[in-house]
Image: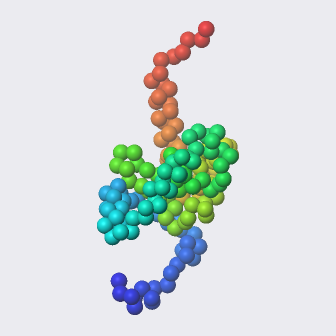
Amino acid sequence: MSEALKEELPLLKADELNDERRRSKTMSRKEMARDLRRRRLAGDFDPEESELFTEIESTRPKTRADCISSPRPCLFVSCKHNLYLDVNPETGSIKLNFPDKEIWDLPYTCALDVAEKGGITLEEVGEIMNLTRERIRQVETRGLIKLREATEAEPPRRVV
């Protein structure tokens, strides 16, 4: 796109788009590795980066008891309970759930904090997870079916 055309197009903010949600963005593992190689070849690799990763790993909470008193928003985005991004365990790809927001702009960053809040509506869950109410209902229904199938597959317990 030419620079002149870019200047003519107005930038729209989320609230100017009739409050429509931005779609999640997925980055593949290959894309991330390619970007890292490109940065290293260009000399953009920061030597402090590895030191920072080591420090983060040493301060990362290991249990819920460790993280319950830690400051919010939770900056440990690689935690499986963090709502900012999702990592596919099979492919290693990363999905940014909120591509238009920074982590400190989110009202909740930890799924465990939401669970401790207690029962909330599908609409509230949808806002927290950047999904529609209908998609949350579908996920809930699928989860309940899986739980029912798992409990029906278990042999009955004997009460002593």
Q: Residue at x 57, y 55 (%)?
A: 75
Q: How is the image coloured?
A: rainbow
Q: Residue at x 45, y 88 (%)?
A: 7
Q: Residue at x 47, y 61 (%)?
A: 48
Asked if one can make out residue 136 in the rendered structure from this viewpoint, the answer is: no
Q: Residue at x 48, y 36 (%)?
A: 145
Question: What is the count of numbered marks?
Answer: 0
- Direction from residue 137 to residue 4 in the image, left or right: left
Q: Is residue 118 above or below residue 107?
A: above
Q: Where residue 25 appears, x then y in whole percent?
A: 43, 62
Work out which quarter of the rendered image holds the N terminus and state it: bottom left
Quarter where residue 37 is shown? bottom left
Q: Where residue 64 appears, x then y in whole percent?
A: 61, 40
Q: Nearer the viewer, residue 2 or 47?
A: 47
Q: Nearer the viewer, residue 137 or 102?
A: 102
Q: Where residue 155 appears, x then y in whole percent?
A: 48, 17
- Direction from residue 27 to residue 133 in the image, left or right: right
Work out which quarter of the rendered image holds the C terminus and state it: top right
Q: Nearer the viewer, residue 53 or 143?
A: 53
Q: Where residue 118 appears, x then y in whole percent?
A: 68, 43
Asked if one can make out residue 72 in the rendered structure from this viewpoint, the answer is: yes
Question: Residue pushed farthest top?
Answer: 160
